Image: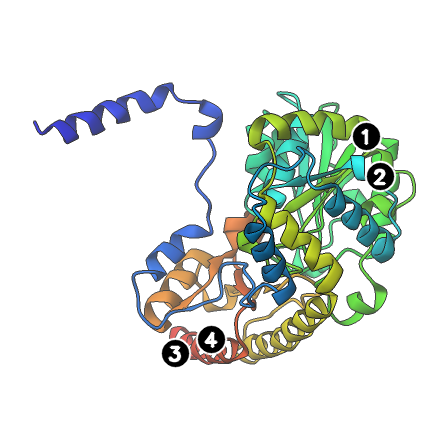
Amino acid sequence: MPADTTRTQEAERLVSRLSSRIRSVPPSGIRRFFEIAATMDDVISLGIGEPDFVSPTPVIEAAKASLDAGRTGYTANLGLAELREAIVGELHSLYGLEYDPREVVVTIGASEAMLIAMLALVDPGDEVLIPEPSFVCYGPMAEFAGGNVVWVPTSAENDFQVTAADIEARITDKTKVLFLGYPNNPTGAVLRRETMEEIARLVVERDLFVISDEIYSRLVYGEAFERGHVSVPSLEGIWERTILIGGFSKNYAMTGWRIGYACAPKPIMDQMYKAHQYVVMSAPTMGQVGALAAIREAQADVESMRQSYDARRRVIVDGLRAAGLPTFEPEGAFYCFPDITSTGMSSEDFAQGLLEAERVACVPGDAFGPSGAGYLRCSYATSMENVEEAVRRITRYVERVRA
């Protein structure tokens, strides 16, 4: 038997001895279709949630200058003091939040911020409530920390709004954390202030912690833009028990820079800080320098990109509705979530058929939780030309499957 075959078989035998916590978590439901799409020509991707814009020029220039100046070492574990001060200032000016720079840690993307938040809050057996459909990493992050995920379903009939009643019905004596992710990926839903205030009162009453992922806070549209983003820790009574997660990937088109952050009251941050120290030491220095330039010099870029996404949003939503696919009106992020049940196909079969027949890559809705069954996530973080062509191809595919 060839040596490489023997080694593979031995590795497979040893898999049963690996961490059951990791083995029980499925691979990301987003990636599979794009691995297939990568082998095909003329594919329009409406899948990965990545801005098609290049990072703003001041960001790139500042990072280059830092490298030319030889700034290639570690920063302080919490991150550059100037960047943390700038984050505090931005959060105050935008949402009225009050943090000390010592209550901010700069992380490797929002993903690390989520992980260290879970590690700081969750003991084995604790229950973490997560409204769904939700981004695919929320549940696994809780499970990596030893928590048990309790899903809280939402629906298009209620504009994918999670309510205090939905949450309260699933609280037990083991519930410790409520995880909120709004503006929402994959639905584009934005919670109303009155709904958030009811949830905040419940959180205090039941003595829960909150982790709030607000990575899309600047990308809101229509009435949600007029109302303005409401940051969870600004709500009465829950600043002390909330971890706020943000970052630069979406608002500033800086996905590859991997710069996020978490804000929390210092007693909580002190525990998150330990996890951060041991896991990553510090976020990339040139990325932090770029993020500082983003806050200081790229505000006009954020608004320009938001307006562009808004125009694409209108085109794709109108186009999908015209194709006979009921589509919830997204108010934030850069995703829409059409209902494909009228075709008689499952989300998986529709996405697979669409990719094969029309070379359009989307994500099956149930990759984001059981409530996503019968839906498709379509990202409009691509060019208007691609959005328009994707709508034509989807329309053609829907007509074919209904014929």
Image spot of residue 303 (x, y percent): 72, 70
Mark 3 vs mark 2: which is more N-terminal? 2
Dividing the picture into quadrants, the one containing residue 73 is top right
Going by the numbered disc 4, the residue's amino acid type is Ala
- Seen as rendered, the residue at the extreme right is 236
Label 2's element? loop
Going by the numbered disc 2, the residue's amino acid type is Asp
Query: Which label number is shown at residue 390?
Result: 4
Mark 1 vs mark 2: which is more N-terminal? 2
- C-alpha separation, residue under disc 2 versus residue under disc 4: 46 Å
Mark 2 vs mark 4: which is more N-terminal? 2
CA neighbours of label 4 inside 10 A, class few (<14), some (14 to 19), many (20+): many
Q: Nearer the viewer, residue 51 or 165?
A: 51
Q: Verify CB contact (< 8 Å) between mark 1 and mark 2.
A: yes
Mark 3 vs mark 4: which is more N-terminal? 4
Image spot of residue 65 (x, y percent): 59, 56
Q: Which residue is mark 1?
A: 266
Query: Which label number is shown at residue 403?
Result: 3
Q: Verify CB contact (< 8 Å) between mark 2 and mark 4.
A: no
